[in-house]
Image (cartoon, helix red, strand yellow):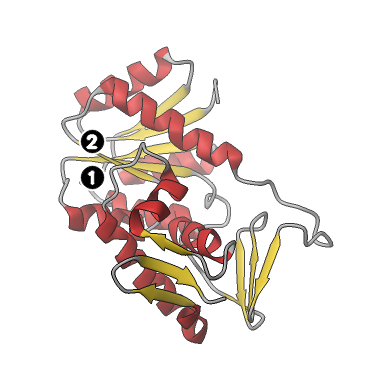
Amino acid sequence: MEGASILVVEDEKEIRELVALHLAKEGFRVQTAGSGEQAQALLVQNTPSLVVLDILLPGIDGLSLCRQLKTDPRTRGVAVILLTAKGEETDIVAGLTVGADDYIAKPFSPRVLVARVKAVLRRASRQPTAEPETDDSQCIAVHDLKIHVGRHEVLVAGEPAELTATEFRILHFLARRPGWVFSRQQILDGLYGDSCVVTERAVDVQIVGLRKKLGMAGSYIQTVRGVGYRFKP
């Protein structure tokens, strides 16, 4: 984790420099950008481990940039923390829907920001690395779904399903234990630990999007009224 590269994208110079200063003190290699366009140019030159990204940016906004990062195979594995003054639940859900890994509302404590960055990088480092194409040891096959963790790939009846990082983690979390019922809080804890500000309502929104992308296989994710969700056994 120490020495990991981080890109800070923030249009307010004072905040940008503050974030960069505290991250550099912790040994991270930091680059900064004042706009989405500038961030795109830097991303072409170098792929960071994590992006601290403001939503309200001039030109390309943070949500659009996050969506681009998470849909491009070259940058899909880059972690994203949204840093913004927009702290309403709908904004949190919107950020997670496009694939953000965490969300911090302004005003913020630099110590909390650094702790969140380290927590997200720890989670990313625990993600399994890709296996050779002939190795199915990381593949979960349930019904007509195949979930390959190393390749971050989901196949539905042989056809790929394009999921965000959060949707993929929820599907993998549930599919590992078919029949087990998990509350929304248990799902959040399993995905993020206790360092995330995500609300339980955000889980419902993610499930809706996940079911839609899985098509008929979306019915495998079952709602247990008054409790939470389970994957069809």
Circle 2 is placed at which residue position?
11
Which residue is outermost to the top? 25
Establish if 157 lies above or below 49.
Answer: below
Identify the residue shown where x is 33% and y is 65%: 227
Q: Residues within 10 Å of mark 2 (few under 14, many from 20)?
A: some
Can residue 48 be seen in the rendering of this structure? no
In x, y percent, where is residue 19? Answer: 30, 24
Q: Secondary structure at mark 1?
A: loop
Establish if 93 lies above or below 191.
Answer: below
Q: Of residues 45 and 230, which is closer to you in this image?
A: 230
Identify the residue shown where x is 23% and y is 35%: 11
The N terminus - image quarter: top right
Residue 132 falls in image quadrant = bottom right
Q: Is residue 184 left or right of residue 140?
A: left
Circle 1 is placed at which residue position?
57
Q: Amino acid at mark 1?
A: Leu
Q: Of residues 179 and 158, which is closer to you in this image?
A: 179
